[in-house]
Image (tube, grey):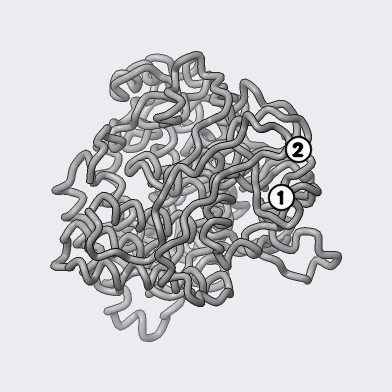
Amino acid sequence: MKMEFKSIPVQGKNILAGISIIVASLSLAGCTKNFEKYNTDPTKLSPEQTLAITLTAYAPLEQNIYSNYQTAQNLSADEYAGYGMTSTGNFYGKNSNYGMNDGWNKDGFISQYNNIMAPINNIAKTGIKAKNPDLWAVLLIIEVEAMHRVTDKFGPIAYTKAGSSLTSVPYDDQKTIYQTFFKQLDTAAASLNSYIASPQFQTTPNVIGANDLIYGGDYNQWIKFANSLRLRLAMHIVKVDAATAQQQAEIALKAPGGLLADVADNAAFKQTGSRVNDLWQFDQWGDNSLSAAIGTYLTGYNDPRAPVYSTPAVYAPIAGKYTGIRLGANNVNFPYKSSVFANYNCKKQEDKGTFYQTAPQLLMTAAEMWFLKAEAALRGWNGYSSSDAKTFYEKGINISMQQWGVSVGSYISDNTSTEAAYTDPLNPANNSAAVSSITIQWDPAATKERSLERIITQKWLAMFPEGQEAWTDFRRTGYPKLFPVLNNASNGAVDTQIQIRRIPYPVDEYSKNGAAVNAAVQLLGGPDNAGTRLWWDVNKANF
């Protein structure tokens, strides 16, 4: 695998250092040329200078939510979510076998401090919170969207005290981090709603404009995103703190501005300059294939999204099928791999398949929100009933099919199709019977647990290829049911059947911020390995 590829950083080289170094330098690192010009005393910037600095920051910040995507997410969360599997080389002892490659995984920890928190901290020093609270609101939403991905991979992280010390930066427990996320979203939503209601909005409705690669400066869309992000985070904590989960979910469900509801609301950042779609980039090497997990569901359900999500296998015994590769298989150079990219082999760049060179990258979809609403209804939140759960569930499927440009046909009324069994044409030892018997059609007589499996399975199919959130759903609910890893190289740290729960802290942290990371392990409540559950990952097998 050509591991030299990295996503384009905000500036120069990414600094692979401990958090004590990174967060201590938050007041020193700049994110734009303008900021370097004015950084000598940011408290004395004019409103015009503050605005100029801030506007140039949005595009790189948005793109760097997926900074170092391959190593930060694709070679971990995307695999653990059952979406992808590496298809070249012997990867025993690497992430796909729970061997855990620190050289890859540290990018998912450090990059967000370098490329998200440091620039936002610098911008805060310009006085933007008071001068332009609407601009600060969008930055807060970006920060929460980026940093929840870090804590949901690793557990306790440095967050509320980032930048407070030159020697050791303490970590927050996840409960504190989530409480802070909700408060930041409170501030962001209030500021944006206030600006929209102000006379200034009538004369200047769009301040950020084209600098915003997600919504083009549309504050109404950012309010929807903030509300939707709150609902996502609320559901994360439902098993560990049901009361707060319901409270925050109902705030989101009743909030002014609403949630992402239609395909046009989907949050995705555009590519600019020399930056390309991360998924397109590393697939050029041919080393990323469909996971057997999603392949068997797509096949068993006769899912119309299959040819959009993937090209079929080309190896003779299974040519034309969406077979995929089992997680943790050790074969070298699989001849039957299937690309996760529709039309990847098209001759002309402008023949736009699913993940073409300049395709925007999805952060959140309206389909995800409909499935979250279905789960909220299943739990009886917000005055919803079981009939609402059915309505929202079916809406989620329809919106997903619309998003991917396929006809839903009779998919929703299919009450017989289930996940297919997996057959490996080269190594029968990798074969597996289907692990799920869940059907598609809503069943009003099903138990809540069975209904939850149905919701999460279809949500998982709809959220492809965003494996970070899908892996979180799997850990908090146990769904969709996924094949266990074939070869477990964790030396007993990870139970093969329970599957991987988190990513260990980077080795650099122990040498550069040792006292803090050792204290964080105490907050974690278990050893710093891939088998320890996060705070919200409560071992409850029932609804």
User: For this rendering, which residue is in front, 78 or 273?
Assistant: 78
Quadrant of residue 501 within the rendered picture: top left
Residue 498 vs residue 172: left or right?
Answer: right
Quadrant of residue 478 within the rendered picture: top left
Residue marked by disc 2:
334
User: For this rendering, which residue is in front, 387 or 267?
Assistant: 387
450 vs 411: above or below = above
Query: Looking at the picture, how far across and down is residue 252, in whole percent?
Result: 25, 63
Looking at the figure, which quarter contains the N terminus? top right
Query: Looking at the picture, how far across and down is residue 96, in whole percent?
Result: 59, 31
**Residue beneath the point at 71% across and 50% down:** 338
User: For this rendering, which residue is in front, 71 or 430?
Assistant: 430
User: For this rendering, which residue is in front, 344 or 414?
Assistant: 414
**Residue beneath the point at 51% across and 71% down:** 401
Residue marked by disc 1:
338
* Number of numbered discs overlaid on the protein picture: 2
Q: Residue furthest front?
A: 416
Residue 275 appearing in the image: no
Query: Looking at the picture, how far across and down is residue 249, in whole percent?
Result: 23, 58
**Residue beneath the point at 26% across and 49% down:** 449
Q: CA distance from mark 1 to mark 2?
A: 9 Å
Mark 1: amino acid? Ser
Query: Looking at the picture, how far across and down is residue 473, in whole percent?
Result: 38, 46
Residue 222 appearing in the image: yes
How many C-alpha atoms fall within 10 Å of the one at disc 2: few (<14), some, or many (≥20)? some
Residue 146 vs residue 442: left or right?
Answer: right
Mark 2: amino acid? Phe
**Label 1 element class:** loop
**Label 2 element class:** loop
